[in-house]
Image: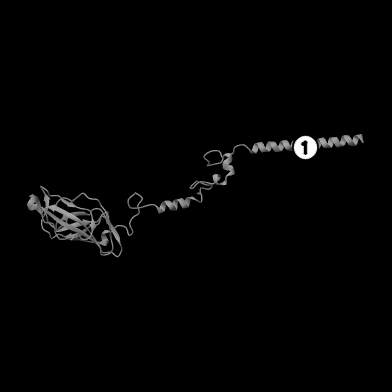
Amino acid sequence: MAYSSRSSRRAALLAGGVAVLGLLTACGNDGAGSGPQKVSGTAGPATETAAEDPAASAPSAGAATPGGSTSASAPAAATASKAGTGTGTGTGSKTPAGGRCHTSELRASVGRNDPGAGQENFPVVLTNKSARTCTLHGYPGAAFVNASGGQVGPDPRRSSGSPVTVTLKPGQSAWAGLTFSNPEVSGAATATPAALLVTPPDERDQLKVAWTAGPVPVSGNSSSAFLSVFSPGTGA
């Protein structure tokens, strides 16, 4: 009986030792797993709050994810940015429907002179001959040329004004004023051009209009011609 009792205590002590050893082992493993872990791409160590809150640990819009892809919210942000982007002015405003009028879509003409106070005043008219709606904004370019295509006199200057966008439906027109001093009044040297070359705003190609209004100033006093911004209509 004494041997049996000693055997039982030894077994109990052995079992207790194994249990304590297992407990110590478990505690040791728990301590090793609780140390800070470095995660590639994070701005700083994760906090306990972030670990408990799934939203806090979600990647932000556009953040890189393993494999070089982006988070699911990135395409939505890009679409919103694209939707608000304008192409015309760099200020975020959208280009008017149809876009600007191209030279090939326009017909040029020079209207009737409306003289006054020693000035000669002609409307330079551009008409939309295309089948689409387009726009003009600002000043035209212009130059007088002789029969062989050589320029006569300096380029007209721009008069002061606030450019506006003129929308032209098919068949509609816009005009800019061409003004210069009457050479007989100013005493400027003159030449009689064969044509006026007109360049629409933001275009390179020109439109040629026969000039039948007589001499224009080319040098000397008050020899400059001036152009105004485009306005709707024909200027008649």
The image position of residue 180, as x and y in percent, is: 14, 52
Residue at 66% across, 36% down: 31
* Residue 117 relative to residue 231: left or right: left
Residue 191 % position (x, y): 10, 54
Name the residue at the right extreme: 1
Task: Please tell me which residue lies in front, 120 or 102.
Answer: 120
Q: How many marks?
A: 1
Element marked by disc 1: helix
From the top left corner, tell me how far across and down residue 221 is, in percent: 10, 47
Location of residue 113 in the rendering, given as x and y in whole percent from the top left corner: 14, 59
Q: Is residue 151 visible?
A: no
Residue 83 location, quadrant: bottom left
Front in this rendered view, residue 232 or 150: 232
The residue located at (83%, 37%) in the rendering is 12
Q: Please indicate, yes or no, whether residue 4 appears anywhere in the rendered image.
A: yes
- Name the residue at 57% across, 41% down: 49
Looking at the picture, the colour scheme in use is one colour
Of residues 110 and 174, the one nearer the viewer is 174
Q: Is residue 158 left or right of residue 77?
A: left
At a point 67% along the width and 38% down the height, the residue shown is 30
Q: Quadrant of the C terminus?
A: bottom left
Q: Which residue is mark 1?
A: 18
Q: Quadrant of the N terminus?
A: top right
Disc 1 residue type (three-letter): Val
Mark 1 neighbour class, 10 Å CA radius: few under 14, some 14 to 19, many 20 or more = few
